[in-house]
Image (cartoon, grey):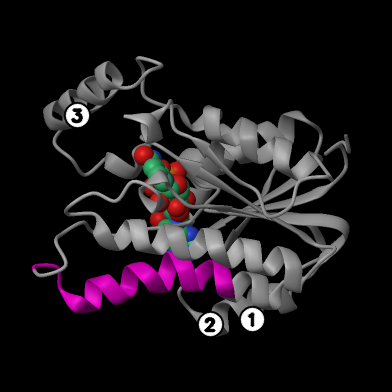
Amino acid sequence: MASLSGKNVLVIGGSSGIGFATAAGALAEGAKVTIASRSEEKLRAAQALLKGAVEARKLDVSDSAAVEAFFDASPTYDHIVVSGAAFKFGTVRDQNIDDAYAAMNVKFWGAYRVARKATVAPGGSFVFVSGFLSRRPKPNMVLVGAINAALETLAQGLALEMAPVRFNVVSPGIIDTPTRAAMPAEARKTLLENVAKALPVRRVGQAEDCADQILLMLRNTFMTGSVVYVDGGGLLI
Ligand SMILES: NC(=O)c1ccc[n+]([C@@H]2O[C@H](COP(=O)([O-])OP(=O)(O)OC[C@H]3O[C@@H](n4cnc5c(N)ncnc54)[C@H](OP(=O)(O)O)[C@@H]3O)[C@@H](O)[C@H]2O)c1
């Protein structure tokens, strides 16, 4: 299996959660890591936690011109991980349609824009982060499931269209990351405890559980078009 040592790895959404754990893991394997996201503040905080050994670059993947300019000013990365997303939940009837478009614009079109513009070095790859709602739709989260399904199919199509560049997807279940930071602490705790009780593995996921799988996909040159569910058995219940 190829090593990540000395490879240029870009993690979009690397300032938090699954992206941050991926950046930390790649760094530990000797990669040269760049993290990118919208907030300078989050990027600086992540850089400090990663001991400043990574480059941090501002990027909003919902902005086509910004994505073009970012990659025009980039070195050739070996691997690109797209883990950035931000959305509000709500029923199809109740959710503001502009919020719905915005969610798709970041998570689906963001990955699409990156894949359309970025080139990776020979032997390189892309990993997108989707979510198990693609296969297990839930009321109130219908749009997110649909976005995740679209992202998984996008990666599989690109694995053919842009071969031999590899495209893979990690599809997380419930992972305890800062993504739920806006929830009241007690509600968040109860949610995570209930999920842990219900899952076959009896715990919620940690960002590192997903990062391990992402790093494997970067290294394993025989993997392309794969969608791996890192969900503690969430698809089974
Ligand atoms: N945590 C879960 O339970 C779970 C479950 C299923 C799927 N997922 C998926 O896993 C991925 C990572 O989630 P996470 O839990 O690690 O979330 P997180 O901790 O909130 O991290 C999200 C990251 O995306 C960045 N980001 C947001 N909007 C962006 C944009 N427009 N352009 C560039 N970067 C952007 C954020 O930084 P800035 O705010 O600085 O931009 C942050 O670094 C997401 O796609 C999420 O949908 C998570």
Residue 64 is tagged as 2
Q: Mark 1: which secondary structure? A: helix
Q: How far is mark 1 from mark 3, CA to CA?
A: 39 Å
Q: Identify the mark nearer the N-term, 3 or 2.
A: 2
Question: Which amino acid, by three-letter code, is at mark 2?
Answer: Ser
Residue wearing tag 3: 191
In depth, the one of 153 and 97 nearer the eye is 153
Label 3 crowd (10 A; few <14 / some 14-19 / many >=20):
few
Residue drawn at point x = 51 percent, y = 70 percent:
110
Residue drawn at point x = 35 percent, y = 14 percent:
202
Q: Identify the mark nearer the N-term, 1 or 3.
A: 1
Beta carbon at label 1 within 8 Å of ligand 1: no
Left or right for 140, reference 236: left
Residue 141 is tagged as none
Question: Which amino acid, by three-letter code, is at mark 1?
Answer: Glu
> Is 51 one of the magenta-colored residues?
no
Does residue 101 show up?
A: yes
Give the quarter of the figure containing the C terminus.
top left
Residue wearing tag 1: 68
Q: Which residues are magenta?
A: 94-112
Question: Which amino acid, by three-letter code, is at mark 3?
Answer: Leu
Q: Nearer the viewer, mark 1 or mark 3?
A: 3
Q: Is residue 150 above or below residue 1?
A: below
